[in-house]
Image (cartoon, rainbow, N blue to C red):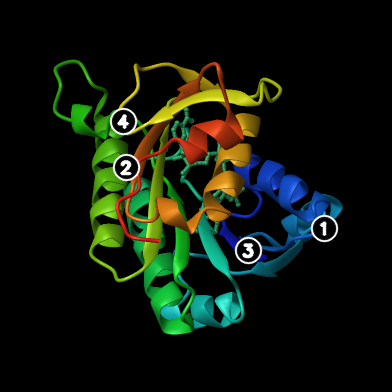
Amino acid sequence: MRIVIAGGHGKIALLLTRLAAGRGDTVVGLVRNPDHVQDVRDHGGDAVVLDLESASAEQVAAALAGADAAVFAAGAGPGSGTARKETVDRDAAALLADAALIAGVRRHVQISAMGIDRADDPGVDEVFAVYLRAKDAAERALRDRDLDWTILRPGRLTDDPAVGAVALAESVEPGAVSRADVAAVVLALLDDPGTAGLTVELVGGGTPVAEAVQSLPRTRAE
Ligand SMILES: NC(=O)c1ccc[n+]([C@@H]2O[C@H](COP(=O)([O-])OP(=O)(O)OC[C@H]3O[C@@H](n4cnc5c(N)ncnc54)[C@H](OP(=O)(O)O)[C@@H]3O)[C@@H](O)[C@H]2O)c1
């Protein structure tokens, strides 16, 4: 499989690159910093330098040409202000989906976040609320597009080693999950186009990743 990852130098993206490349997939990471290209290569992938806050959909589509799947794993990151939540977490996600439509790459996994319905809860930090609304808008933008999308909402991310077992369902209790387990779930979702049309939440748990993905409900006839 040829997989293109937006935000190719992110922590989940690099773990996914190593996992996918390790089993023979071709991975191309879209990175905005030329200094990150070698890192992606060191993880077994290749990289295309593209800033998703300034690239056109046609430029991103060119990078997607010939791919079997696209993954949105970019994010403005914890140190960023509200503006970049909108330009990256919301707009860059929609840009990748538009580019996928142009390139004819139907399979799409978008990394979203648990708790996006909590933006208006009392006590939620303003920047975090903007982030949650940006993720929510990105989800809605993807659902509006005619792609075979699966939206994955992880809980709080950790850098712990992979456990290989998770809790994955349309709704799970809040919790944490390692980025390594998220990467494994993304790969298993890519392998299973029958999960298209699902929005699923993910935290650490006791079900082996392959079994957790197989157990998801199917929304479309296969
Ligand atoms: N942190 C949490 O607890 C949590 C929970 C649930 C979901 N998530 C979501 O999980 C996803 C991945 O998390 P992660 O920890 O792997 O993220 P990460 O390590 O922060 O990686 C995000 C990547 O996006 C890239 N990026 C930012 N702006 C870009 C642009 N304009 N063009 C191209 N790439 C750009 C960054 O590149 P640079 O290195 O150049 O900045 C970075 O490599 C994110 O979507 C995040 O919102 C996070």
Q: Say what amino acid the circle numbered 1 marks.
A: Arg
Q: Is residue 127 above or below residue 73?
A: above
Q: Residue at x 72, y 52 (%)?
A: 20
Which of 153 and 193 lies nearest the eye of the viewer?
193
Q: Quadrant of the N terminus?
A: bottom right
- Pick whichever of labels 2 and 1 is earlier in the sequence: 1
Question: Is label 3 or label 2 in front?
Answer: 3
Question: Is label 2 or label 1 in front?
Answer: 1
Looking at the image, do the residues carrying marks 4 and 1 touch, with CB atoms under 8 Å apart? no
Disc 4, SS? helix
- Pick whichever of labels 3 and 4 is earlier in the sequence: 3
Q: Say what amino acid the circle numbered 2 marks.
A: Thr
Left or right: 7, with 94 as reference point: right
Looking at the image, do the residues carrying marks 3 and 1 touch, with CB atoms under 8 Å apart? no
Q: Is residue 112 above or below residue 42?
A: above
Residue occupied by mark 3? 3
- Residue 16 pos. (x, y %): 67, 46
Q: CA distance from mark 4 to mark 1?
A: 33 Å
- Residue 67 pos. (x, y %): 60, 73
Q: Residue at x 30, y 33 (%)?
A: 127
Q: Residue at x 60, y 64 (%)?
A: 4
Disc 1, SS? helix
Q: Quadrant of residue 38?
A: bottom right
Please give the count of numbered marks on the rendered protein.
4
Q: Is residue 175 above or below residue 45?
A: above
> Within 8 Å: ligand 1 and the Cβ of disc 4?
no
Residue occupied by mark 4? 128
